[in-house]
Amino acid sequence: MIFVTGGAGYIGSHTCVELLNAGLDVTVFDNFSNSQPEALSRVQSIAGKQLRVVEGDIRDGVALQQALADSGAKAVIHFAGLKAVGESEAEPLRYYDNNVVGTMRLLEAMKATGVKQMVFSSSATVYGVPQFLPYTEQHPLSATNTYGQTKLAVESMLRDVHRSDPEWRFAILRYFNPVGAHPSGRIGEDPQGVPNNLMPFVAQVAVGRREFLNVWGNDYPTPDGTGVRDYIHVVDLALGHVKAVQFLEREAGCNAINLGSGVGHSVLDLVRAFERVSNRPVPFKVGPRRSGDIAESWANPALAKNLLGWSAMSDLNKLCADTWNWQTRNPNGYTG
């Protein structure tokens, strides 16, 4: 049994599908603050298997401990948290409360129930401004925004817990830029309000929900002047979590591991690929650079291959095609 916090979210729902496909039982603990219960209904339909759902907030230690004890889980995958960079700058205390205090409550509940294996959803934002590329796990850690600082704080907490008791096992997965959707088109990214990430914004422009895309800066020192990022298919990412759970069953320690494709693509690369697969125009307007944005970011994923036996499999066309399939089937997301 795997206990998944935030399992109804974008990455969480795709991971639940792959956990069920791998023959694992799943309990989801989610407060649905930025997700829809409908996503979990579709997860069960895709996998042809049931999962258990408990509605609750990770800051509620009593409810969390009860749910964890009732689940009989041997490991936790921890997705629950807030993730919008701009919002984190405007509401830092809310982000520390959810992301850092919430994780502390989860660790307390795990300690009380004797569950000492966790896969943690971290981010490449912990590397900050690149001192070298591609990023390896040995790159110095830093953060240019509050969201990244909360991820850094949690990573430090996990390392401290492991040092205090080596029976704890942690896999800290540092994601690059998750995009795409399940090939079925049944689950995908359903941002509330204006999307914070590039791919869903592009998709909403292509489907006609938005007039144009804002491209923030075209004067970076990159081949076409726009920012370069490492885009990874969400199903590849989900499979990385299954591999991480299996890794924790056989290996002790506290390991930080990049999950990325190892290839960088610019904003305009992604726009052009999306236009090809959708056969729709994606008009855009160039605006000034955003504060805190960096020119380039991509992963060295060698450690994931060595430790987990995992590599990203999908190319940019596949990322765009699966996103477009989801967007056209669900033009208004789950609520539509």
Image: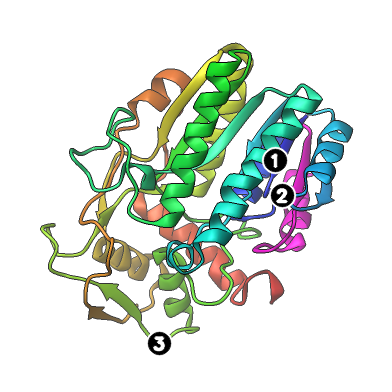
Q: Is residue 44 magenta?
A: yes
Q: Nearer the viewer, mark 3 or mark 2?
A: 2
Neighbor class of circle 3 (other Cα within 10 Å; few <14, some 14-19, many 20+) is few
Name the residue rendered at 63%, 49% in the picture: 80
Q: Classify residue 206 by image quadrant.
A: bottom left
Of callouts 1 and 3, the N-terminal one? 1
Please state the extent of the stretch shown in magenta in the rendering: 25-48
Q: Is residue 51 visible?
A: no
Q: Nearer the viewer, mark 1 or mark 3?
A: 1
Three-letter code for the amino acid on which mark 1 is drawn: Arg
Three-letter code for the amino acid on which mark 3 is drawn: Glu
Circle 2: element type: loop
- Label 3: which residue? 211
Name the residue rendered at 76%, 45% in the picture: 28
Question: Mark 2 touching mark 1, by CB under 8 A?
Answer: yes
Residue 274 higher or lower than 64, as above or below: below
- Label 2: which residue? 59
Q: Which mark is residue 267?
A: none
Q: Is residue 2 magenta?
A: no
Q: Nearer the viewer, residue 74 or 276?
A: 74
Classify residue 92 as left or right of residue 273.
Answer: right
Marks 3/2: CA–CA distance:
39 Å
Marks 2/1: CA–CA distance:
6 Å
- Label 1: which residue? 105
Residue 332 higher or lower than 125, as above or below: below
Classify residue 313 as left or right of residue 118.
Answer: left
